[in-house]
Amino acid sequence: MDTADHDLLVAQARSALAVQIDEAFEQWRHRSDLTTHLLTRITVPIETINPYDWMAVQTAETQVLWHGRDDGICVAGIGKADVVAGGEGDDYDHILARCRRFLGPLPEVRYFGGFAFQPSSFDDDRWYGFGPSRFILPRFELVRHPARTELRCNLLFRHDHPLDRVKIQDGLADMRFPDSDADRSLPAIVGRKDYPDKMGWSGNVLSALDLIKNKVLEKIVLARRADYRFAEAVSSARIMAKLHQVTSNCYHFHFQPDSHAAFMGTTPERLFKRVGRTVLSEAVAGTRSRSEDAVEDQALAEDLLGSSKEQHEHDIVRKSIRQKLHVLCDELHVEDEAGLLQLERKQHLCSRVTGRLSAASSDADLLRQLHPTPAVGGYPRENALTEIPALEPFCRGWYAAPIGWVSSEEAEFAVAIRSGLVQGDTVSVYSGAGIVEGSVPDQEWQEIENKISDFVKVSS
C-alpha cells in the first residue's frame, strides 16, 4: 500500500471515531434515567500501525504502553479518561477498588499503572509524578492484535465531572501518525555515572555477605543505578521502540504520567496473572548470557543449570512463592526443577507456578503476598526490606515494583526490572543482583552490566 492510500485510511478511521464520539455525547445528554456515570468505549478499525512508532510522535503529556509477554497484544495510550492516584496510606484493596468502580460490564477495558517498590520511602523528586501508586485509563488507545489494529476512545461520563467534548475532539485532531520514514535515531551518549560506583558496590556486597554470615539474611537483592547523559533530550518512546526489537519474550512497558519523566523497560518476570480463579506466577532467578555460537550457548545454559550458587538463589525464590501462594490457593502446583527462560541476550532459571485462587482471596492479597519476591527483595523479606534502603544510595521508586493492568474480571502484573527513568537528556537505568553466600562483588557487578547491555547497545 502506498503512502497516499495509507493516509486516506487513517483519516477515515479518525473521522469515524470523531462521529461516534459526538454520538456518545448525544446519547449521554438525552439519558432519562438516574445513572450517575457511564463508561463508554468506542472502537474503529485502522490500518496496521506500529504502536511504538505511533507513541513516539505523540505530544500528549500522559502516555502509556503495555505489550504483554504471551498474548501478542500491544496497547499504546495517550491522554487521561480517568486517573487513580494513591497516597502513602492507600493499600492495594483501595487502589484496585477505585480502578474497578466504573468498569461495570466492560471486561476488556483496562487501567494501566503500578506501585512504588516501598511507598514509605518514596522521597526522590525524580519520581514525583508517579507517587506511591498510579493507574491510568487512557483517553485514546492504539491497540495492535496479532491479526488487526484498532483505534479506541474511552469516555467516562459523570454528572459530577462533565466531559469537555471540544477538548476531546481537539485531542483526536491533534493525534499524530508516524511516517514510514520516521526518524528513529537517538542522540549520542556523552557521559555515564554509576550509583554506587564500583568501590561502593564492593563495599555494599561485602556488608550484605556479613549479614548473611550472621544469619540476618539468606539472600538480599542489591540494585545499581547507571545514569546515562545524552547530547540532547532523548525520547523514551524511541528507546522503547529500539528495545522492543532486541528483547523478545519480555513484557514491554512505558508509563509517562506527565512531561516530567517516563518510566520504561523490558522485563522477563511475571509477578502474577489472574483469569477467573486461575492464577499464574513464576520464580525467575539465576542468569547467564547467551551466545550466537550454538555450542557456546549450550555450554552457558548447562553451566547455569549446574551452578549450585544459582540453583540455591533460585530455590529461595521458588520456596518463598510456594509459601506465599499456599495460603491463598485451594490448589497449587510449583515446578520442582528449574527450566530455562531464554531471551535474546540472556537466559534465566525459571520455575512456573499454577494455582486455583480460593474464593476469599483477591488480587490485592496476591500483591501483598508476592511483592517483593526474593528475586528483587530478599529473604527473609522483612529483613531485606530494612537493609535495602540502608545499602543502596538512591530511592528505587517504581523500579522492581509491580506494574501492569487491571480490568473488571482479570489482572496481570510484571516485576519492573531491566528498567529506566527518562528525564530530559538523562536516562537512569536500574538493575540488580541477588547476593547469597558465595557471591563475589566483581562477578555481581558484571552480571548487572550484562543485564543493562540491551539498553547500552540500542542507545549507542
Image (tube, helix red, strand yellow):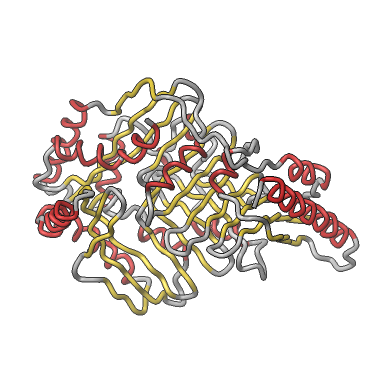
* Residue 56 in the image, given as x and y percentages of width and height: 57, 39
Taking the image as shown, residue 312 lies to the left or right of residue 380, namely left
Splitting the image into 4 quarters, where does residue 396 fall?
A: top left
* Image-based side of 407 in relation to 426, left or right: right
Q: Residue furthest front?
A: 2
The image shows residue 296, relative to residue 170, as above or below, that is below
Left or right relative to 389: residue 164:
right
- Residue 322 visible? The answer is yes
Q: State whether residue 367 is above or below residue 201.
A: below
Residue 76 image position (x, y, % from top left):
58, 50
Q: Residue at x 34, y 34 (%)?
A: 456
Which percent across, then down, holds residue 299?
A: 12, 55
The foreground one among 78 and 93 is 78
Residue 308 in the figure: left or right of residue 224: left
Q: Residue at x 79, y 61 (%)?
A: 36
- Residue for point 41% across, 24% down: 229
The x and y percentages for residue 352 are 30, 67
Residue 39 in sight: no
Q: Residue furthest bottom?
A: 331
Above or below residue 339? Residue 293 is above
Q: Quadrant of residue 123?
A: top left
Residue at 47%, 61% in the rendered image = 412
- Image: 172 above or below 334: above
